[in-house]
Amino acid sequence: MSIDEYDVVVAGAGTAGCYAAATIANEGLDVVIVERKDAEEAGHIACGDALKGADAFPEAIPKERLEPAFTNTGVDHGRFEIPQEDTVLEIPVPGELAVIDRWEYGRRIIAGAEDAGVDFHYDTVINDVVQAGDGRVTGLRAKRKGDPVTYESDLVIDGAGSLSLLQDKADFEGTTFDTNVRYSQFCSAYREIVEVPEPVEWDDALVFKATDRAAGYLWYFPRTSTEINAGLGFQMNEEPMQLVEALKRDLRNRPEFEGAEVTDKLGAALPTRRPYDSAVAPGYMAVGDAAGHVNPTTGGGIAGAAYAGKYAGEQAVKAVSDGDVSEENLWRYNTRVMDHFGGRYAGLDVYNVLATAVDVDDLMGLLAALPGEKLAEALYEGSTSMSFGLKLKAAVKSFGYWGTIRNFYQTKTLADELLDHYGSYPTSPAAMANWTGERDAIMDRIYETTGADAKY
């Protein structure tokens, strides 16, 4: 068995892993990314390809390296199709939008990390984590091209994606690392890249379509006017084949897809849950999907993963330089994530909780009654406000759904309270127990108000 020594070992060559490793390498530390795929397949990841926040990326990998993968920068709004209400909502989306070629983007972030000095070990399948007697993570065990290898390091960064194997293997007893993770908090996604014979009319929009179940939705995101990412997301407790058939049926019924050719198919899991309460343990940090860093209402995770990688990388440099990779010394990574987007994502997750307890027809009726710009705020910001006039207009349009609306606004009030609570996220692990206790009390009121089963 060979032994490879690095300052930091990063699991996974996704967005979070590449940005974390590049940030570390730029400061002169030795860092390796271990990736289970080969060099050709690395970066080939199932994704909706829509990118919100396309104008803002961390500087560790220069944005100009990525821009050739931005295949459509003309998208500027969402188009929400609600067949139950025979309605189409045109929804403005705040911030810079783009649709990307995810595989090309994946190659480019890998090349950018290589430029920074990151080593890449492909065809490397992780089997276990290595921990010292005091519980500190000190490396990984893996097979590289079939041969056993041990990676010894001061710090391990887990960018291995949803339901990471590393978290099954590590012993987090005595730490604050969030182990309250279940399959029901995750979504399965399936997407096809479809070439259509004629340009679509909606190449400036991200198209969403509700299914007949609240736990699933379809999307059509135009990489170009003739290359469409057509996909489906659904909670893991749903029957996958029934919902995949909903996508295929919709593709057959759309005239713009007549004569289309499917060029790629891929599926994956992603978190539709709040970010991990804590994503650090001694010698260990989790980033990106491996830490729940995804907008739980839209599934968007690229920008959040990039910044999580930046924050983890910067904290890794400090911890290794200090010779102190304790939970306390890694904690600032948690606080930066929560301050930037983590608290907002936790607020958004409340609406996922509500959706599990609302009849799908009532939910679609409510969405059809909301003004588009307010719906956009709810989907992306975690909170929205409405004047009395807008409330009255929505009430008139939504006659018959008033019970659902009352439930929605009661839930919104609690979501705002939760968002405020995340604004006081603890500055050290010692204060975590009290903070989570108060947060859980708010969640109990959310479950009581919505009638939903407890998610966590």
Image: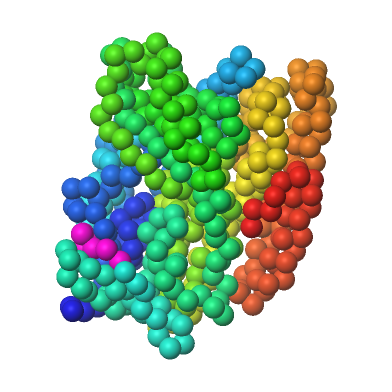
Q: Quadrant of the N terminus?
A: bottom left
Left or right side of 78 for 428: right
Q: Is residue 322 visible?
A: no
Q: Is residue 349 visible?
A: yes
Q: Residue 108, position in %: x, y?
A: 26, 46
* Vertical side of 20 occupied by 245: above or below: above
The chief SS type of the magenta part is: strand
The image quarter containing residue 132 is: bottom left
> Which residue is outermost to the bottom?
133
Q: How many marks?
A: 0
The residue located at (69%, 32%) in the rendering is 359
Q: Quadrant of the C terminus?
A: bottom right
The residue located at (51%, 65%) in the rendering is 279
Give the residues in magenta: 119-126
The residue located at (36%, 74%) in the rendering is 129
Q: Residue 140, position in %: x, y?
A: 32, 73
Task: Depth check: give the residue in front, 275 or 319.
Answer: 275
* Vertical side of 48 occupied by 456: above or below: below
The residue located at (27%, 63%) in the rendering is 125
Q: Residue 350, position in %: x, y?
A: 67, 46
Magenta stretch encompasses residue 234: no
